[in-house]
Image (tube, rainbow, N blue to C red):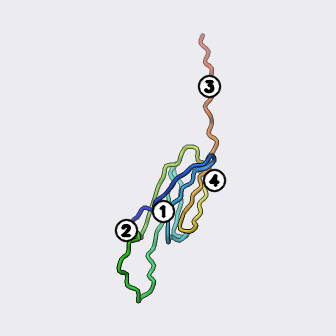
Amino acid sequence: MEWRPVANISETADTYVIRAELPEVAKKDIDVSVRDGVITLRGERRLENQGNDEKHHRIESFYGSFARSFTLPADVDETKIKAQSKDGVLTVHLPKTELRKPRAIEVQVR
């Protein structure tokens, strides 16, 4: 079964931040990749057996593979993206670059 973890995206003066809620997802089961201006967060949340003598009466948590993709703004420096996983939250920092500012060109009419 595939599920979609919730994600919040915020911005500061010099970076964008994606925070995705990934409870019970191990770091080894998370993959972050960037391709053609799109960042993809994917992985798997595994249902661990607690023991042979335990019977589940209800399971409301989602398990299985997940993938979330987001189009990157033009001012993201893809070479400096960093990600960390802590306390069930994957935090991805997307540093901004200095975009070239448009400049006026004077046109002479003859």
Horizontal relation, residue 90 to residue 52: left or right: right
Compare marks 3 and 4 and give the one earlier in the sequence.
4
Q: Categorize mark 2 by other alpha carbons within 10 Å: few (<14), some (14-19), many (20+).
A: few
Mark-to-mark CA distance, 2 and 3: 54 Å
Mark-to-mark CA distance, 1 and 3: 44 Å
Compare marks 2 and 4 and give the one earlier in the sequence.
2
Q: Is residue 40 visible?
A: yes
Residue lying furthest top in this view?
A: 110
User: Which label sits on residue 80?
Assistant: 4
User: Which label sits on residue 1?
Assistant: 2
- Identify the secondary structure beneath mark 1: strand
- Identify the secondary structure beneath mark 3: loop
Horizontal relation, residue 94 to residue 41: left or right: right
Mark-to-mark CA distance, 3 and 4: 31 Å
Q: Categorize mark 1 by other alpha carbons within 10 Å: few (<14), some (14-19), many (20+).
A: some
Residue tagged 3: 104
User: Which label sits on residue 42?
Assistant: 1
The disc labelled 1 sits on which kind of residue?
A: Arg
The disc labelled 2 sits on which kind of residue?
A: Met
Q: Residue 76, how many percent across, how many down?
A: 58, 47
